[in-house]
Amino acid sequence: MARISLNQTRLVVALFAVSLFLSGCASSANNRFWGKTAAPTDNVLRYISGSEPESLDPHISTGQPEARVYIALYEGLVEFHPKTMEAIPAIAERWDISADGTEYTFHLRKNAKFSNGDPIKAQDVEYSIRRALSPEIAAKGADLAYYIKYAEGYNQSGVFVRDSPTGTFLLKKDFITDEKEKAALESASQTAANEDLTAVSERHKFLDAPERLVLKGDEKSRAKELEADPKLKAAVQGKEFVPVTAENFGIEAVDDYTFAIKMRQPAPYFLGLLTHQLFRVLHRPTIEKFGKNWTRPENIVTSGTFKLAVHKPYDELIVVRDPNNWDAANVKLDGIEFYPLEEATTMMNLYKSGVVDAIYNHTVPPAWLGEIKQYKDEYLNLPEVAVEFYSFRVNQPPFDNLKVRQAFSLAVNRDALAEFRQTVKPLYDFTPEGIFPKYEEARQKVQAETRRTKNISQKEWDDNRRFNPEKARQLLTEAGYPVIQNGSTFSCPSFPTDKAIINY
């Protein structure tokens, strides 16, 4: 298979520059395609996937460059539909959802296999999700699974509170102050009490029982938690703390080909979350045998459409079709060659010269967009389930102050950013717009209720969210960081920039 070395990359860039010089002012407007159109000699996709993967362990990274590789190498209970992005059957051929939306039962394919030929069973799914939530792994995306009952408690090394003489546990519903949440927990408790549990496992009975109270496992953190709630502090006096274990949180291999998930609350979008790499299935014997080296090409066993053939970090990563995959007959590619690159102009030059067949999104330099947008057969500008955002440490100054956060939000000109980037839309909520109609409908209802409750007009609501530098300066001053005007420019010399940790 072809591979791209550093010298080849330099050569391609040089040749491309020469070709531009020789072509002078010749226009390509009459051509149908912007890139090279020679048919490939093999059935392999050569693809620039972004930066070098942080790891080939899908529980480690949440990045997009890694996710593109994970989709090829690993499979989960469900997979993305290539057009709608909805969850479709993968290792699970079908599933049932309880009427209250808190129980999912997945029925696995009996012909699903790992790349070494081992059958994929419900126990493998159970092991993989338990591993993903284990405190030792410290998965960055673990919070995606917090909708599962006691998953957060296990991931955060939490503890239950038990009364030793009676063996009973404190319940969450008895310490909730939010009335809506309390009503939901009491309703769930009543539903569980009305269920006929004679034919289910002891584990199922435990998961269906009223939700236990979970406190922080670390003594210092728990002490702060108790000091903040006198009622809770009094209730735990004389009680013992029982660690939340992997066996406690709400997943269960019912049998070899039936897997159940118990939620702490309904989440209509949970099936979509299960497409994430956090929930993809791993081969336990390989991990236990090789430890940290299990992802090396000579050791790795995968569960996806493709299996790993070559991995040379910062050079190439090659996967080939896995004949053991349950859907191998419908896989059209013989392989994919992933090339790790980050520099946008180099990527585009490699694509236009025909060295690679495709590049990942977000790579077209703004200056090139005007030219490339005319080639409708190869430039695809479609909605994407992605969002870019700034995050702050809100548990320490200065961003523990709400007015500071509001000021920074109002100081970002989203419209100007979108106009410059040309391929993005201004976003005022965390979920991309125009992709999830049901979510947007629900969001609008919540926002309308919030405006009604707080007696805020639509205009005032919009003004508090959109670009407003004057109000941003006012809020920053009110927060204790006065903004000083010097002609047409403004500065805030007292703002502690050394503590303003911002992640993009």
Image: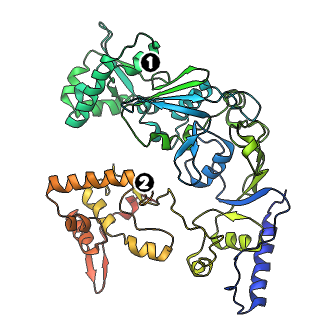
Picture quarter with the N terminus: bottom right
Report which residue position mark 2 lands on: 436
- The image shows residue 458 at horizontal and vertical percentages of 21, 64
- Residue 12 higher or lower than 309, as above or below: below
Indicate the colouring scheme. Answer: rainbow
- The image shows residue 180 at horizontal and vertical percentages of 22, 37
Residue 146 seen in this snapshot: yes
Alpha-carbon span between mark 1 and mark 2: 33 Å
Residue contact between numbered discs 1 and 2, judged by CB atoms under 8 Å:
no
Residue 190 in which image quadrant: top left
* Circle 1: element type: helix
User: Which one is nearer the viewer's eye here, 156 or 98?
Assistant: 98
- The image shows residue 366 at horizontal and vertical percentages of 55, 77
Q: Residues within 10 Å of mark 2 (few under 14, many from 20)?
A: few
In the rendered image, the residue lying farthest to the bottom is 25
Give the residue type at disc 1.
Answer: His
- The image shows residue 213 at horizontal and vertical percentages of 32, 25
Q: How many numbered marks does the figure carry?
A: 2
Report which residue position mark 1 lands on: 204
Q: Residues within 10 Å of mark 1 (few under 14, many from 20)?
A: some
Residue 287 in which image quadrant: top right
Side of 121 where 147 appears, left or right: left
Q: Could you tell me which residue is drawn at 43 percent across and 32 percent down? A: 148
Give the residue type at disc 2.
Answer: Phe
